[in-house]
Amino acid sequence: MFSKILIANRGEIAVRIIRACKEMGIATVAVYSMADRDALHTALADQSFCIGGPEAGDSYLNENQIISAALLAGAQAIHPGYGFLSENAHFARACRRNGLVFIGPDPDSMERLSDKAVLKGLIRETGLTVIPGTKALSSIAEAREFAETIGYPVMLKACAGGGGRGIRLIPGEQDLEEYWHQATAEALSAFGDGSVYLEKYVFPARHVELQILADEFGNTVCLGERDCSLQQRNQKLIEETPSPAVSATQRQKLMALAVEAVKQLRYVGAGTLEFLLDKDGNFWFMEMNVRLHVEHCVTEMLTGIDLVKWQIRIAAGIPLDFTQRDVRLAGCAIECRINAKSCSTVQMLHVPGGPAVRFDTSLMAGLPVTPYYDSLLGKLVVFAKTREETLRKLRAALCELVIQGVDTNLEQQLCIVNDDRFISGLYDLTFMGGR
């Protein structure tokens, strides 16, 4: 096992990883930008290094500075969290060249699976059903030809995408050129790669994803599905597990297919397979995220399995000590993402408590919320034996959570969890339309 790990991230996920390391007896190294000098993750880590200015490109995306900090601190491994460098094969290779373990898939596997258009070709060979689509497109003319073949509307997506960036719904031919320029520009800005592809628009649908853990010895398990259909502008707001739209029979079949697909892909680490579930009960594969997911904690609450600790163990060459038969999916867990709507200073923070109530955050009273990074302030997660009880607990926790000084989406989250469509479980990706 590693004795010291550097966390190449910030915010709640850096705090989450530091806490896991402490429980495992592993020393931690934090890196921070000038804007995060007083951030919680810098205080919790055993060591911390400033790696650049407030902009992510000068700090959390600065590969050389991060690797230098790891070597100076004597760390054996780097955990990238999610976002930033978590799916960057170049960075993973740089870690390897410098004798550091990248806690995630190997660079070749990451490169092979991160390109969504390439991945779909591989997935077709595993038996999963893939949404009809293209490889990376070279021109608007090529996009227009494909769209005319399958019919509008179509989805335009970034090949190196994630987090809802570089995605546009194209209603008709007259919209293609405008959205093409928007999507490619956004993809280039967010990921350094402006390539895009087209796929058929599945509508109406729910967004369902499966969590996978796989070690280097061929052991692979699926930890159930998460329903991520509550989205606004392609950004997830609420996740729950299990999905109220997936039957026990569907779940068993899909989990078995996902495990077999991951084995055929020779994937090692934590990963997520994402699907669209259409009105006829068909699951259409969309993409695979080769990293820890933002919403990993809702799966942890349901299963009792610590995904961050297992990421670290797998990277250290330790085999899984449980099988698919040991994975229990009893009960219900729901997560609300609490986002900032303004940049200001946190004046007062009160976090809800009680059994099976969790708030992953890096907020502290007196610290500013800056404009340089993602708006996510924290993730409120609750668990209970039934969905009805979980909803009651979630409403109580949302009412108890107090964040003064910063405008947040707390009121919006309360409206959603009190909406009859959400309470019934009969919602889909159109839920936030018009809101």
Image: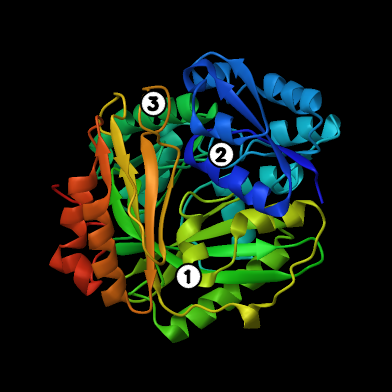
The numbered disc on residue 408 is none
**Three-letter residue code for mark 1:** Leu
- Asked if the residue at tag 2 contacts the one at tag 3, i.e. Cβ–Cβ closer than 8 Å, the answer is no
Number of residues whose C-alpha sits closer than 10 Å to that of mark 3, classed few (under 14), some (14–19) or many (20 or more): some
- Asked if the residue at tag 1 contacts the one at tag 2, i.e. Cβ–Cβ closer than 8 Å, the answer is no
Distance of label 3 from label 1 (alpha carbons): 32 Å
Residue 68 placement, left or right of 161: right
**Three-letter residue code for mark 3:** Leu
Q: Which residue is mark 2?
A: 14
Mark 3 or mark 2, whichever is nearer to me: 3
Q: Nearer the viewer, residue 69 or 45?
A: 45
Q: Which residue is mark 1?
A: 302
Q: Of label 2 and label 1, which has the lower sequence position?
A: 2
> In the figure, 392 relative to 340: above or below?
below
Number of residues whose C-alpha sits closer than 10 Å to that of mark 2, classed few (under 14), some (14–19) or many (20 or more): many
Q: Quadrant of residue 333?
A: bottom left
Residue in the image at 48% along x and 42% along y: 162
Q: Nearer the viewer, residue 376 or 133?
A: 376
Farthest residue, direction top: 53
Residue in the image at 65% along x and 71% along y: 221
Q: Of label 3 and label 2, which has the lower sequence position?
A: 2
Q: Nearer the viewer, residue 11 or 282?
A: 11
Q: Nearer the viewer, residue 283 or 343?
A: 343
- Residue 151 lies, in percent from the top left, at 32, 53
The numbered disc on residue 367 is 3
Residue in the image at 77% along x and 39% along y: 4
Question: How many marks overall?
Answer: 3
Snapshot colouring: rainbow
Q: Quadrant of residue 67?
A: top right
